[in-house]
């Protein structure tokens, strides 16, 4: 198993994790702990392994699933329990000890079956449907007062063309809930309702609900999907299922609102170049990001199409047609991964999408391609490893520069171009035939924020800004209060440098003299109590104007990677903030920039967003 950074670099010089002992079989399942840097692995020989990022050590246990191929690994939301299932019908419940080792708690065995799915519902939903098991657990709690509430989960098994759904816990209590007429292709929990949704290989979707606090279960409703076979089913918006099937000739995602009964389809746009084979556009996998409301759809030809949920369309006026439910979704720019896609998954930071296909594994990173106008130059990042530089006055031909790195930041002066990522930075100098590399150096801290001004490179350090030569040699440090945290964003406009920190402070320096001088409030300015900006919203980007009197900033929605609808401007003269909420226009700011000559003029690029009130 290899572990890599989001830029494709190995976490260690040796990319492979060294597993204890000799192993000749493959790993079958991987899943990260929801809160700790701990990776759980399930192997073909039944071994369950834990690997810690901190100590780089593997701990293993094969006592539960010895000889049975691991089919399922599922953590509870709080990470206190891991449920595993194998091809011999065994279920294991585990916890993590103080040394990051897997410790088996209980196991079940449904003979002559294989475990296909495990879902762990929210604690409140599980306990509301667990009257039958509650009495047994209460008895255990009386014997073991420190045991605490039980962890409940549901699991599906298949065998001989049939399936069954069970409910179990970490106390040894298990019960068969209901049977299905085909092997299970998907199983989900309807959070807030306590219902179980199953889809069989016969394409029959059924919804079962608990009666008498879980003593009995009955089928509330069922219906047949358009295409038979192994369907991919995920929750999209609350109460709405997104369903895809590679055999579906419509090449669409079928949407089913289980709350109001609506159903509709989302169809990917046609490819730019049609190869004449419509089957290559069929959807093979789905993943929904609930934080950003984006549904990613992997296609057979290696393309990932994305749809963003914008909210319920506004009510129509008299005489107008009612909006169709698919109008609540907007098609976003997709990405070509190449190879037949079999699985896609969003990362916990919500800006990473992993894709597994016939050509290997890929990581797609959501980035805002950088652009800047400075000193008569326009710099535009056009791809992950390429930038375009041209003179604003057209005095020289546009230059395309491709570098051997994944670019996460770019800046330029009239003579130099600076590009960087979390590992390395490069400085290029303009010449008669284009840009020529003159230096490469370490990017410094993990935040890897930089800017360039004349013959100096500014690099984020630990509670400081390092002033470096163009070769990366530190010649001065700009120190600020360490309580303000690490520099997260940085911008230079003319002779002014502005930074924002992890603790929500902004700090400015004047760069025009022999050395940088503090500008504005000596200790920096805390960004708080800003109208329309919720508590906990982090600064996402900052820009300083040409005379250093104003700093504009965008924010991220708390707990999300999405950009908040409010843009704020800090005014140095009044020591206050002014804001504008783009939600009232139905849009969200995406980027912002000050004019290089006029200090009161700046522009904002926006995208369509949820109307004011949606998702708040």
Image: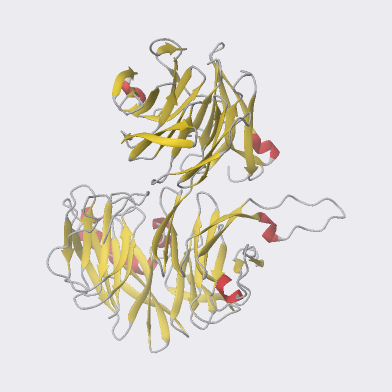
| Point 29% across, 49% down: residue | 36
Residue 339: percent from left, percent from top: 46, 68
481 above or below 425? above
Task: Count the marks.
Answer: 0
Residue 573 quadrant? top right
Residue 559 visible: yes
Q: Nearer the viewer, residue 76 or 193?
A: 76
Q: Nearer the viewer, residue 337 or 61?
A: 337
Give the quadrant of the C terminus.
Answer: top right
Residue 130: percent from left, percent from top: 39, 65
Give the quadrant of the N terminus.
Answer: bottom left
437 above or below 478? below
| Residue 262 relative to residue 405: left or right | right
| Point 32% across, 24% down: residue | 463
157 above or below 337? below
Residue 426: percent from left, percent from top: 38, 36
Residue 612 visible: no
Q: Nearer the viewer, residue 587 or 499?
A: 499
| Point 47% across, 32% down: residue | 431
| Residue 140 relative to residue 289: left or right | left
472 above or below 327? above
């Amino acid at each position: 198993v290899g572990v890599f950074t989001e830029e494709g670099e190995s976490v260690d010089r040796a990319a492979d994790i060294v597993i204890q002992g000799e192993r000749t079989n493959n790993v079958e399942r991987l899943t990260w702990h929801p809160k700790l840097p701990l990776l759980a692995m399930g192997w073909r020989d039944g071994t369950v392994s834990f690997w810690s990022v901190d100590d780089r050590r593997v701990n293993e246990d094969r006592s539960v699933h010895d000889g049975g191929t691991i089919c399922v690994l599922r953590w509870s939301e709080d990470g206190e329990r891991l449920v595993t299932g194998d091809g011999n019908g065994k279920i294991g419940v585990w916890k993590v000890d103080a040394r990051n080792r897997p410790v088996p708690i209980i196991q079940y065995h449904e003979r002559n079956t294989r475990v296909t799915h495990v879902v762990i519902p929210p604690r409140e939903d599980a306990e509301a449907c667990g009257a039958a098991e509650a009495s047994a657990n209460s008895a255990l709690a009386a014997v073991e007062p420190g045991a605490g509430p039980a962890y409940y989960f549901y699991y599906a098994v298949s065998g001989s063309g049939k399936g069954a759904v069970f409910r179990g816990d970490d106390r040894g209590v298990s019960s068969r809930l209901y049977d299905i007429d085909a092997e299970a292709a998907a199983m989900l929990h309807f959070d807030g309702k306590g219902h179980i949704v199953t889809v069989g290989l016969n394409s029959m979707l059924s919804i079962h609900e608990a009666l008498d606090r879980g003593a009995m279960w009955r089928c509330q409703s069922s219906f047949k999907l358009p295409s038979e076979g192994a369907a991919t089913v995920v929750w999209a918006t609350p109460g709405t299922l997104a369903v895809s099937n590679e055999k579906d000739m419509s090449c669409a995602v079928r949407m089913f609102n289980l709350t109001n009964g609506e159903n509709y389809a989302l169809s990917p746009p046609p490819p730019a170049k049609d190869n004449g084979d419509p089957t290559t556009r069929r959807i093979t996998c789905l993943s929904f990001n609930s934080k950003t409301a984006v549904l990613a759809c992997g296609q057979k030809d290696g393309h990932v199409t994305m749809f963003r949920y914008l909210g319920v369309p506004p009510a129509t006026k008299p005489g107008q047609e009612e909006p169709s439910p698919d109008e609540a979704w907007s098609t976003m720019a997709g990405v070509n991964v190449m190879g037949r896609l079999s699985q896609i998954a969003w990362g916990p930071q919500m800006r990473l999408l992993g894709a597994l296909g016939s050509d290997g594994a890929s990581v797609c990173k959501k980035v805002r391609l950088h652009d800047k106008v400075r000193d008569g130059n326009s710099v535009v990042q056009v791809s992950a490893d390429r930038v375009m530089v041209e003179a604003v006055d057209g005095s020289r031909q546009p230059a395309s520069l491709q570098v051997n790195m994944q670019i996460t930041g770019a800046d330029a002066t009239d003579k130099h171009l600076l590009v960087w990522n979390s590992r390395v930075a490069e400085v290029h100098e303009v010449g008669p035939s284009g840009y020529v590399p003159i230096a490469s150096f370490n990017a410094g801290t993990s935040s890897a924020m930089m800017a360039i001004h004349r013959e100096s490179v500014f690099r984020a350090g630990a509670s400081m800004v390092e002033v470096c030569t163009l070769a990366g040699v530190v010649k001065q440090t700009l120190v600020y209060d360490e309580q303000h945290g690490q520099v997260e964003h940085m911008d230079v406009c003319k002779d002014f440098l502005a930074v924002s920190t992890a603790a929500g402070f902004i700090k400015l320096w004047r760069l025009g003299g022999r050395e940088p001088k503090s500008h504005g409030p000596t200790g920096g300015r805390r960004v708080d109590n800003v109208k329309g900006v919720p508590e906990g919203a982090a600064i996402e980007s900052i820009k300083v104007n040409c005379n250093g009197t104003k700093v504009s900033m965008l924010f991220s929605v708390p707990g999300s990677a999405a950009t908040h609808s409010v843009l704020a401007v800090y005014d140095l003269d009044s020591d206050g903030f002014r804001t504008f909420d783009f939600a009232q226009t139905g849009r969200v700011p995406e980027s912002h920039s000050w004019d290089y000559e006029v200090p009161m003029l700046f522009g904002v690029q926006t995208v369509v967003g949820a109307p004011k009130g949606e998702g708040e």
